[in-house]
Image (spheres, grey):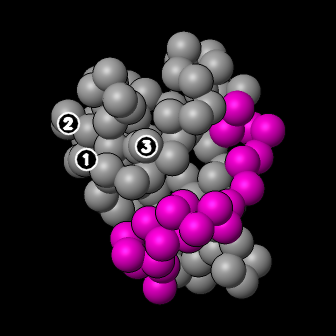
Amino acid sequence: MLTIEQIRALIHGGQFVVYGHLITELDKEGIPVEEATIIMLNGKSIKEWPERQRVLEAGHTSDQVPAHVVCDLSIEDVLQLVTGYIPDSRQWFGTKKRKPKRRGNA
């Protein structure tokens, strides 16, 4: 599985690519794309998809804005930064724990 140490080593080594989707989504949030690496370097893995070599990282921008970035290592030795966003308080307790989904009225 993709570890935080691997993620940080790939970021430090410049072995990553940024998807257009990440750029678009961070732009909607008012976060410069360069902040994605800062989020990854100071973040914590909060969800894993081992079958896809994918991880959700929770961290903060350099201005301490909480944010999430999804990264993928399905291409060996190249970290792919897939998407990012500011966690919605209606769906998250803080930045690291997802609230349970509400069921419709019965």
Comparing labels 3 and 2, the label whose residue is closer to the camera: 3
Give the residue displayed 39% in from the left and 54% down from the top.
Answer: 41
> Which kind of residue does numbered mark 2 sit on?
Phe
Residue at image mark 3 = 38
In 3D space, how far apart are the residues under numbered discs 3 and 2 (Cα atoms)? 22 Å
Furthest-front residue in view?
13
Residue 28 located left or right of residue 4: right
Report which residue position mark 2 lands on: 93
Viewer-proximal residue, 32 or 19? 32
Picture quadrant where residue 65 is located:
top left
Range drawn in magenta: 1-23
Q: What secondary structure is found at the residue carrying circle 3?
A: helix
Q: Where is residue 77, by image quadrant?
A: bottom right
What is the CA distance from the residue labelled 3 to the residue labelled 1?
17 Å
Q: Are marks 2 and 1 in contact (CB under 8 Å)?
A: yes
Residue type at mark 1: give it: Lys
Mark 2–mark 1 Cα distance, whole angstroms, equals 7 Å
Q: Which mark is residue 96?
A: 1
Outermost residue, right side: 20
For image coordinates 43% across by 43% down, the residue present is 38
Q: Residue at x 37, y 71 (%)?
A: 4
Callout 1: 10 Å neighbours few (<14), some, many (20+)?
A: some
Query: In terms of secondary structure, where does tag 1 sit?
Result: loop
Can residue 19 be found in the magenta stretch?
yes
